[in-house]
Amino acid sequence: MPPPGVCLNIMEARHKQDGIGSVAKPESFLNQDPEQLKQYCLIQGVRYIDKMFPPDRISIGEGLLSPHDLSRVEWLRPPKIAPNPSFVLDGVSRFDFGQGVLGNCWFLASIGALTFQNHILEQVVPLEQTFDDNYCGLFHFRFWRFGRWVDVVVDDKLPTINGRLIFVHSKDPNEFWPALLEKAYAKVCGSYADMNAGTPAEAMVDFTGGVHMCIELSDPPPNLWELLCRAGQSSTLMGCGTPQGETSANTVLPNGLVQGHAYTITGVRQLMSRGKLEKLVRLWNPWGKGEWNGDWSDKSPLWQTVSAQERELCLSVGDDGEFWMTLEDFCKYYVDLDICSASPDFLDGNSSCHWKTSMYEGRWVAGTTAGGCMNNRASFWTNPQYRIQVDGQYSEKESGKNTLVSLMQKPDKRNRRLVQNLHIGFSVFEVTDQYKTQKGKFAASFFSTHTPVAQTKTYMNARDVMVFLTLKPGEYLIVPSTFNPNETASFILTIQSKAEAHGYENSGYRQHEPVQKLQQVKNANEDENRKILFRQYSDKYEEVDAEQLQRLLNENILKGDLKYGGFSIDACRSMVALMDTSITGKLNSEEFVRLWKKVTTYKDIFFLTDVSRTGTLSLSELRNAFVASGMRVSDDMLNLMALRYGASSGHMTLESFISLILRLDCMYKIFKQLSDGKAMSLRESEWMYVSMYT
């Protein structure tokens, strides 16, 4: 059984600090280390079979093949499919492969772009893999997945019918890198069926771990041609798509283009024709066939208007899926252009300028940190907030766009087809002088008096959205949000800038900050009265166990508030464990008096902040309850407490609130006593001793 998610999150954060998950030290996907598995197979003399992505119908997925075809599928290793199998034959090229029955043209278009960038290709596809020495039926590939690089292991059993590959296949039957790469990506998506339908940008980001720019070709920027040329000369991957037809079918139009289809941009070039410069874009159809038949197509007479040298250099007549068209026709017949790169250095053509990257992971949780867009004035401020300081000097000569902000939502489902993207976006605010000294989260009043200096045009149900903007040196607040409030999801916020930009999550949590008690007057008579009451419920040793404590609290502290629910026996057991200094499972009178004071204090805070008078705290009121107690907690911690102690309705009872804040106070004290204030080291027996009783 895997450890709880909170433990996994801590482990992931530690791994990140150690560089695990970087392109140089990818994380083992599903904890499958390729070297360890390979050595085991070689020592045992067996061929690898991947139990995490087994060669059966589960890995193919639902709805992709008919029941009849599914029953005919046979999973074969390459030596059973081809006489002389090779991983790579005569280098890697976009012309190596063609699409199978799977509707993943978006993925294959991305592979086509990948073949132009050897450095990126070798990060994704380790080319030293062979079917020769040390072959054991195991191959591995690397992808960037939501903030970290992962090394993905697969066995080389491939689905076939009548001995022929049913998904992507190489034009040379002895070459297998495309089919194995597709299988590895199907594994991270959940199944082959989970790769059905998508956009090139998704896979291109997963190949580069970089930034994605999407340009709508119905309203292209004035410098589109210059941008294409710079991208073509840099380490970028480029793809595009045609508009969807009346149905989801990939209908071939009279002009040769396919509706609702992904293409790769494989080149840009200016040619002199009939006394003027023609701006041409070269595209490739991942079907490996089917081409545009308009101006500048393979058999267009316009090729006779250019020099023989240019014609020899550019024109390749053949039904290989690749063709040229003018920039004007490109914008007319395609809907969007996707450019992906590890860095946006190419944007301004200044090779000496290296953009800096910072990345933040966060989460929206319904009721606490999912405030929705700015239409929701009362709750927008509760969204995660990030304060960013942009350094440097502002120059009118360099007043162009200098910052790229990208927001990507992380899925909470293993299978890609089950992921429902929310409508997401973000707003950027300038932090004016009067707010620069403020600590912690900016309240609703800030957003009622400040308008964004930049924001996403619309909230989109896409995997990621981005804005390219100009930020002068200064301090800014970035607020990512879903369009609707109370939608739970995780996200990655990436900021890339020319100048140094320092940032931090802005929920205002200060490490090791204890709960601040409300002012209480020391009254010896009150304490004595509580002890007298205590003795009415205690045993002959003047101690109370959890059952006795339950009656005492419910009958005396809650009294008329019992209509809101009393303390359960489990809550009282927890209180005993937290306050029990002698480890007897009982409380003496001194321990009880301390507990009484805490419970009455927290009860007062509860009703003070229950402004809706429902007898419960909404999760936004919970935040105010912590403020009233004198304690700030981070958004992450608030989300965690809401999930652990809140009801499914999104509200928290008095019992749950008191249990929560008692535990929080106790955990702080344990850490303070057993640590140096920064870190804590426990032996296994000590950790189990503390965690199993408290």
Image (spheres, grey):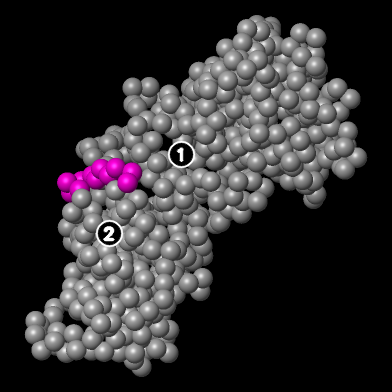
- Which residue: 78% across, 23% down? 76
Q: Which residue is outermost to the front? A: 540
Q: Which of marks 2 and 1 is nearer the N terminus?
A: 1
**Residue 366 visible, this orientation:** yes
**What is the quadrant of residue 296 in the picture?**
top right
Taking 124 as reference, is 67 above or below it? below
Depth order, front residue of 369/530: 530
Which quadrant does the C terminus fall into? Answer: bottom left
Please give left or right for residue 522 compared with residue 601 in the image.
Answer: left
Dominant SS of magenta comes to loop
Q: Mark 1 points at which residue?
A: 147
Give above or below for 96 relative to 692. above
Q: Per the image, is 220 magenta? A: no
Residue 607 at x, y percent in the picture: 31, 83
The circle on residue 667 is 2
Report x, y in % for residue 228.
Answer: 54, 28
Disc 1 residue type? Answer: Gly
Question: Callout 2 environment at 10 Å: few (<14), some (14 to 19), or many (20+)?
Answer: some
User: Of the residues shown, which amino acid type is indicated by label 2?
Assistant: Met
Q: Looking at the image, which residue is at 22% across and 65% down?
A: 581
Q: Alpha-carbon distance for marks 2 and 1?
A: 31 Å
